Amino acid sequence: MRRTIYTEDHQSFRETIRSFIEKEVTPVYDEWYAAGIVPHDFYLKLGELGVWGIQVPEEYGGAGIESFKYSAVITEELARAGVSFGGSSTHVGLCLPYLLKLGTKEQMERWMPGFVSGEEMWAIAMTEPGTGSDLAGMTTNAKLTEDGKHYILNGAKTFITGGVNADRVIVCARTAPATPEDRRGGITLLAVDTKLPGYEVGRKLDKLGLKVSDTAELSFTDVQVPVEDVLGEVGKGFSYLGQNLPVERLGIAVGAYAQAAAAVEFAKAYVHDRKVFGTAVASFQNTKFELAACKAEVDAAEAVVDRAIEAEDAGTLTAAEAASAKLFCTEVAHRVIDRCLQLHGGYGYMNEYPIARLYADNRVNRIYGGTSEVMKLIIAKDMGL
């Protein structure tokens, strides 16, 4: 079936991204993989390419294109090549929506030049040790000074994607204690400059997959955050987090679909070249049946993400629809990638093959952005159950 969500402009952009990946990423990706991080300077190249500014309004140096489709194209091309841009996915995918919705004119004028150029990379810090998906249980706190000029930030965060390379981090902190009647109240978003005294990057976490994505622990000891760096209204942070979760989950759904599609292509190429008992693995009926079944699942996932992308661009994507897309696509990717790895035999377990890396990278899709179990709760609630 021919996809209809992309125009000639999208396809031209796809060719640009594909060429950029082939020239700037693929030749050095093994070095990044071994180091477990993308060099910060690389993000300047993405800035020159215009990637960071696609959705940024023209008045702040961007292209002003209000569409998720360009982001989806990048995700698909990275999966196709079996590479990634590291932890930078949070820069645009997670942080930019908060800035566009909550940033004041003064803040946007101050922050956007570095954001668009890649000189100032952003991350977001929500999760804390021991809280997991229970964001209302966070204990990181920020107290206003007597002169009202700063918030004194103390606490710790973990699993922070892009946390090593980040120049500024949106930190979720309690500016007022929770109450039995409202555990979600009193949370505020602070755009914290990582160069401030007391801000520390702890361990770069050693993960099962996503090896090139820098994921870190962060700690804050009496960090003085200027009140001018509060994002949105004080105490309304939790509601802001809820508003942006659907697009985050859509991004994960698109990534899972793209990974599944890439896995089929990796397996198809491998079974054509690999011979067993003097016969190409592709000639066996089991191989044909397995890949045909995987292709059917990928087609279904493609239909789901395309519908969700269109809904997001139209401004009608609901929390339940995003949860459904994430649940379905991540489960499809889990099944498809596993079967495609099996077709590689022992070589599928070797990290030099992209299918092995894909297998490890994919596993977190059913955890971050809300676990599959949480997605089911959201869908069930929407059903009136």
Image (cartoon, rainbow, N blue to C red):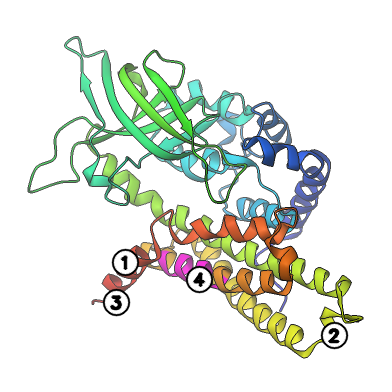
Amino acid under disc 4: Glu
Q: CA distance from mark 3 to mark 1?
A: 9 Å
Main SS class of the magenta portion in the image? helix
Name the residue that disc number 4 marks.
331
The crowding category of the residue bearing disc 1, from other C-alpha atoms within 10 Å (few below 14, some 14 to 19, many at least 20), is some
- Rendering quarter of residue 279: bottom right
Q: Image height check: is 299 above or below 46? A: below
Q: Nearer the viewer, mark 3 or mark 2?
A: 2
Amino acid under disc 1: Ile
Q: CA distance from mark 1 to mark 4?
A: 16 Å
Name the residue that disc number 3 marks.
383
Q: Which residues are magenta?
A: 323-332
Q: State the residue at coordinates (54%, 51%).
A: 208
Q: Going by the image, does 84 lie left or right of 209?
A: right
- Rendering quarter of residue 43: top right
292, 101: nearer the viewer:
292
Q: CA distance from mark 2 to mark 1?
A: 44 Å
In the rendered image, residue 159, in percent from the top left (x then y), is placed at: 43, 41
The crowding category of the residue bearing disc 4, from other C-alpha atoms within 10 Å (few below 14, some 14 to 19, many at least 20), is many
Name the residue that disc number 1 marks.
378
In the rendered image, residue 97, in percent from the top left (x then y), is placed at: 46, 43
Q: Going by the image, does 248 lie left or right of 257?
A: left
Task: Report the quarter where the N terminus lies.
Answer: bottom right
Amino acid under disc 2: Ser
Name the residue that disc number 2 marks.
283
Q: CA distance from mark 3 to mark 2?
A: 46 Å
